Amino acid sequence: MAINLLMAMAVFRRVAETGNFSEVAQELKLSQPTVSKQVAALENHLGIKLMHRSTRQLKLTEAGKDYYQHCRQIIDEIDENEANIRQNQSLLSGTLRISTPVKYGELHIAPLVCEFLKLHPQLKIDLNMDDHYVDLVKEGIDLAVRVGPLTDSSMVARKLGDFPRVTVASPDYLSRIGVPKTPRDLATHNCIVFTLLTTQNQWHYVGPNGSEKVQVSGSFTTNNPSTMKKAALESIGIIVAPTWLLEDSLRRGELVPILNDYRATPMEIHILYPERRFVPARVRQFMKFLRDRLGTEQSNKDN
């Protein structure tokens, strides 16, 4: 088949990153046979094998690994040149793919996305909300907003700020079980654990005597912040959660703060994006927009 070299390189790059022909076909709005033919045509054009295929997995050859880096550099340079032209026209365009946790995304990121789109009407934004780990490179995500400790050292991270957390329970739970006076007392209470934090069953505080940590346990664990809050409202047990999740329930007295002499470790908020030489203008502009709106102490050197 006649080959559009640039298109074949772009297809191969995404296949190398996702490890899946079907995902790339869906992403690029092509048929799976077309994606396979593009990669095969590229191999034929180069006269080398780029990847080993089987029914279960796809693995790059050594030549394929080298050529992937070559494709990535060329495509990034093209993107950079096009972005520079668009910047001269003061317009952002293309598609910006963003990943956020579900509840934080609903409350804080989605409204800002709408505001940003009004400022840049030629831009498209694909907002993906998921509380589970998302591989940014594999999923083709431009940037992610992550809540809590970072575990992926391969990404570039820019801190947005810290959100305070508070320990709370329902009045009914506290009247039945009692009010803990110190973090150590939590060891005898039913504590609802949020499983996506690296600390999980170990809760950390700073109090009158410095740093303290306590191993907690309980009858309910969850990977969803809203479900954790719901369980506390149902008087199942005690939770530690960021204030932005609890504001309405605290205001109405449905949940009440405890351990007021002890401060739970705050929750960090970061922007993450894949490390690369060229960061598109739409990514840089949106990161600056988030920092301006949500508050940050980061240097302007990243703008």
Image: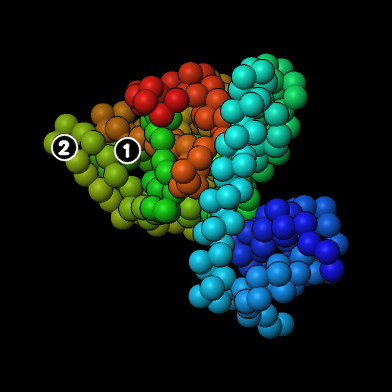
Is residue 257 at least partly visible in the picture?
no
Kind of residue sitting beneath label 1: Thr
Badge 1 density bin: few <14, some 14–19, many ≥20, Cα 10 Å: some
Is residue 275 at least partly visible in the picture?
yes
Give residue 226's quadrant in the image: top right
Task: State the mark number for residue 210.
Answer: 2
Residue tagged by mark 1? 265
Name above or below for residue 90 compared with residue 22.
above
Name above or below for residue 219 compared with residue 60.
above
Residue at 39 percent across and 46 percent down: it is 149
Residue at 41 percent across and 41 percent down: it is 157
| Colouring mode (rainbow / by chain / secondary structure / one colour) | rainbow
> x%, y% of residue 290?
52, 25
Residue at 71 percent across and 17 percent down: it is 118
Name the residue furthest bottom: 54
> x%, y% of residue 142?
58, 42
Is label 2 or label 1 in front? 1
With 145 as the anchor, is 152 left or right in this view? Answer: left
